[in-house]
Amino acid sequence: MTSFIHALKSTDNFTHNDPVTGRFSIRLLQSVEQADMIAGWVNQPYARFWNMGGFSKSQVLSYYQTMQNEPDKAVFIGFCDDQPAFLAEIYDPLTDSLSDHYRAEKGDCGMHLLVAPPVLRRGGFTLAVMRSLLHFIFSEAEIRRIVVEPDIRNHKIHRLNCLVGFTHIKPVQLPDKMAYLGLCRREDFFQSLDVIRPAKGPLYSCEQTAHLSPCYWEKANRHLLRKMIAELSHEEVLQPQQLNARMFQITAGETLRYEFAARRLMVDHWLIDGRSLKRLVRSDQNEWLAEGGPDALEFLIAIGDQLDIGCDDFPLYLEEISSTLYSACYKLSSGNRSAEDLCHAEYQDSEAAMSEGHPVFIANNGRIGFNTADYLAYAPETARSLPMTWLAVSRSRAVFSSFTSLTYKQLIEQELDAALLNRWRDYLVMLELEPDDYYFMPVHPWQWQNKIAITFAAEVAQRHLVWLGEGDDIYRPQQSIRTFFNITAPHKHYVKTALSILNMGFMRGLSPEYMSVTPAINEWLVDLLGTDAILNEAGFTILREVAAIGYQNPVYSKKISGSTGYGKMLAALWRESPQQYLKPGERLMTMAALLHQDADGKALTGRLIAASGQSVEGWICSYLKAYYVPLIHCFYHYDLAFMPHGENLIMVMRDCRIERMLMKDIGEEIGLMNSTLAVPEEISRISYKLDEALKRDHIFTDVFDGFFRHLSAVLDDQGLMKEQEFWALVAEFTKTYQMAYPHNADKYQRYDLFRPVMTRNCFNRLQLRNNRQMLDLLDPQKSFRFGTPMVNPLAQFA
């Protein structure tokens, strides 16, 4: 007898409690007692795929008595709250003809399931049955995979199989049916249990605004106003007056004033104590009296004359601030996990827990276009899971691009279950369309409902676009809001979609023209950097954007849509999952986590350092080796610039120590600055000429000012490391790199990181000047806003 069959037969009344459905128990079928009942089940209309329709009680009895006596088969009956609920057949594929159709392995277990007719219909009951049965089968340690072969017409069971971790590999012709061969590995099943399916139906108003309480509103305003004063002072929009050694004030208009305690750090960073913020109002007697809590919207209106923003744009900016406050209140109300907890959190849990957003931009969660239900469904901080909407897009309108080693067929068969693919192909045939004339393409659900179905109505009516429905896999939105991580199958690709909402100075669309060359850009870059000894030593890895589809709607051609978002409404990108780069014992965390502070003001960086067992200096050195050295090497050796903010890098951690970095967002954001490198014509847009002074500013602006300014402040404020010590380490790593690789000495002088001053690049002033399109992407230089030069923190170490 097969050992796992014997072990399962020997199990005495296995039980499993489902928190919603009830208590399940499974035991060996006693044929004589239950043949009559099972004969009733197999003759139900819904049981037609069981292929026992018309069987009498005696035939059922004979069939299952024979099966129970076979050494490589077993039959079990399952109960829910002591009521008969399902029948399960278990068999060994190694001794079954099914092994003719796939490579059966030791540890494979075959399974058939028949659910009893419902006494009362209960949503999710069959799914609960399947989970209980798989718990039972996998309770036998020898079993590593479960094999199923559902009828190719049984679409309902195909979807349920996918929900518990099965992947349908291919169709197979069996003696009694055409079926799909499906496999579920042990780890896939247990991974599926962590996937929370999105709730169906409306999200009601009480949930949409429950977090807008006076308490959370006051805290959110205090936090945002602290950031607003700090960043606008950094950009010289505001000039706080010093009252004494630690107290400052800002007068806004004639009747409003704020006092606060602050320290001015290097790179002209204002480290403000948010608890000290005090709102003062001028009384009729001309006295300044403390009154009410911080009010970010009121403050902005009061300083409106100091902001370079048009009258027509100001209300929209205020709406973005309101939306940012709305989001902050939600984060506060949802528990705001402690730094200690996040220190050991799973990747997607830490991704959703990030509370700050971009450290420089004040209005960083505008998301103009979302309503309150959209926010709860799609904002990354709500940690809601959702399936992608899929369209069939006409190949006459769409361009598919990919790495040379990857075809469309290979990609789509990796990403979609075989049963789902064939169902969608059959649907196109039913519409009298040729499936091979279309690409299958993921679309953000909001984008389909609010833009494509309406704005592209002509394309839908003419069947250039065909709605297919939801995919099987469940995704989680990332901090960038339009990129999704597959939580059903984490090894599968990220999906990045066009999303026509206004967020942080841009409509978040995707350009079909850019998408057509994005894989080629990635492939060229990987070839360029792949053998670089310095990057390989640091473990610096590019997350490759391997494929894309861009849809060109002739109605919104460049001539008509110009630089508006209408030409960027329908495109999708597939990026590698970071999971494949993990070694045993490693985990992932966004680099944005290094700036995160919990509700009690404790920094996640501090908890990571404490848990690592390293000294603060040793930990920061590991970070600089993984992040800073690769960036300055790419800058000096290749004239290559990334967009290296916290959300664009993923840290690979071991025991809370930083091992190496994964870099993402390549195709849209890398640039070769005044480079002599030969670049293929199709990707020539990444190579551009600019003023030498602007090229010199790249590390200063994007690394020193954009990230190190904030990180050094966190370290100093938390008592972990004085800012002077942090910048000394940065200087040391810069010198060590430059001395080790003297062949770029001319560039070290031309783009001197130790020069006395650095440029003050003012990004909030950019957003205020044009909050609909912050930069002219065709000529970004003309958009920049600069303040007076700042003292370079490395100059003292020259």
Image: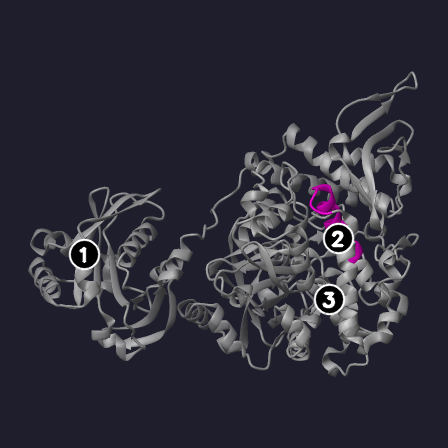
> Can you see residue 726?
yes
Residue carrying label 1? 76
Q: Residues within 10 Å of mark 3 (few under 14, many from 20)?
A: many
Mark 3 or mark 1: name the one nearer the start of the chain.
1
Q: Residue furthest top?
A: 285
Q: Nearer the viewer, mark 3 or mark 2?
A: 2
The type of residue carrying mark 2 is Phe
Residue at horizontal 64 percent and vertical 62 percent from the top: 456
CB atoms of marks 3 and 2 within 8 Å: no
Q: Quadrant of the C terminus?
A: bottom right
Residue at horizontal 70 percent and vertical 68 percent from the top: 630
Image mark count? 3
In the image, residue 500 lies at what x, y percent? 68, 56
The answer to which quarter of the image holds residue 30 is bottom left
Report helix, strand or loop for mark 3.
helix
In the image, residue 446 lies at what x, y percent? 59, 54
The label number, if any, that marks residue 343 in the structure image: none
The answer to which quarter of the image holds residue 478 is bottom right
Residue carrying label 3? 631
> Can you see residue 434?
no
Left or right? Give the position of 575 relative to 705.
left
Residue carrying label 2? 726
Write down the region rendered in magenta. 704-721
Magenta: main secondary structure equals helix
Mark 1 or mark 2: name the one nearer the start of the chain.
1
Q: Nearer the viewer, residue 319 or 327?
A: 327
Q: Nearer the viewer, residue 425 or 479?
A: 479
